[in-house]
Amino acid sequence: MFVDVAEIQVEAGRGGNGCVSTRREKYVPKGGPDGGNGGRGGSVWIVASSGSSTLLDFRYQRRYRAADGRPGSGQCRTGAGGGDLEIPVPCGTSVHEVGTDVLLGDLVQAGERLCVARGGRGGKGNYEFRTARNQTPMHAQEGRPGESRRIRLELKLIADLGLVGAPNAGKSTLLSAISAARPKVADYPFTTLVPNLGIVDLGGWVSCTVADIPGLIEGASAGKGLGLEFLRHVERTRALLYLVDVQDGSPARGLDMLRQELVAYGHRLPDLNFAVALTKIDLVDADRLATARAEAESWSAGHGGRSVVAISAVARTGLADLRHLMRRLYQESGGSGEPEPPTPGSPELPPG
């Protein structure tokens, strides 16, 4: 089960109490205070881990508490500190404070740590309160309580390229054709209910991670359909690939809808480099394909997009051109390697 949002309560440990004690050694005149300080309470840390890919565990455990510090003791001995609590989360998890919605941190790389609740300070023993006028104080300080807060964890998958399109545009079919991923594929809308990731070999020892999210419909940015819930998973991508079913009348109208929803959602998605892929070309004749491609190329050029490629994931048509386009899109957006010059038979990229 894929879970990408969870709310939990985190509580740091309380500091140990200070100790009230006096020296009682034989032959030591007048003795004096020797109560030690309490230990510090344990803190709560969120740690990015590559060993998990979902927030499902937080559905079953919603309260996390670190250990308390131990009280001080005689002979000026400080109590042991409470052990810190580390909570592993998938890489790509952002942490927000519930109520204020303040972003506390964004954990992208494995091993990154974020302290979300600091342990309470230990109380001082009576040894710390001795003065020239009060040489044997008989009071100590209580330990301070640790921080407590409610936080929201949001998982945003880490991918290089994101596939966006209307329901049944062929995103899942394409992902299964160009990678080893096996998302659910069916002939009805909204077969993709959770984001899917696939590793795609782009040739020349270059590969990238591609994310497929549920289809976008008009009004997705306002909460309709499943798009708004999962658009966060393409926030971290370097570039986008717009998929449009060539059978859907006007490609420009479908591309306008996708663009409007991304603009309404924001979060840098409208500013990402993108290219357009016309899908299911095996279901239309050559004249209709040529008209649709010309319309899509005109729209893409007018919105600063890259080339348009026509493909059929089922018939395996145009996939070589698509890989070449994805490679250039990936590299021009900051991926590894240098962009290669277009090869004969591959889609040309417009200047700029």
Image: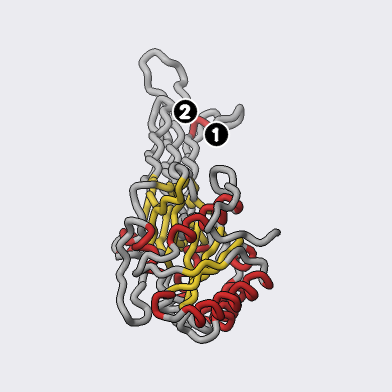
10 Å neighbourhood of mark 2: few (<14), some, or many (≥20)? Answer: many
- The x and y percentages for residue 282 are 40, 75
Of all residues shown, which one is farthest toward the top?
Answer: 27
| Quadrant where the image shows the C terminus | bottom right
Q: What is the quadrant of residue 73 in the picture?
A: top left
Q: What is the quadrant of residue 250 in the picture?
A: bottom right
Does residue 108 appear in the picture of this structure? Answer: yes
Q: Secondary structure at mark 1?
A: helix
Of all residues shown, which one is farthest toward the bottom?
Answer: 249
- The x and y percentages for residue 152 are 46, 63
Q: Residue at x 37, y 81 (%)?
A: 189
Does residue 143 appear in the picture of this structure? Answer: no
In front: 303, or 4? 303
Q: Secondary structure at mark 2?
A: loop
Q: Residue at x 56, y 77 (%)?
A: 255
10 Å neighbourhood of mark 1: few (<14), some, or many (≥20)? Answer: some
Residue, disc 1: 129
- The x and y percentages for residue 31 are 45, 22
**What residue type is disc 2 on?**
Pro
Q: Residue at x 64, y 64 (%)?
A: 271
Q: Earlier in the sequence, mark 2 or mark 1?
A: 2
Q: Residue at x 50, y 78 (%)?
A: 289
In front: 278, or 196? 278
Residue, disc 2: 33
- 339 w.r.t. 124: above or below: below
- The x and y percentages for residue 237 are 52, 58
| Quadrant where the image shows the N terminus | bottom left
In front: 58, or 169? 169
**What residue type is disc 1 on?**
Phe
Cα distance in 3D space between marks 2 and 1: 9 Å
Q: Are marks 2 and 1 in contact (CB under 8 Å)?
A: yes
* Left/right of residue 209 with respect to residue 307 in the rendered view: left
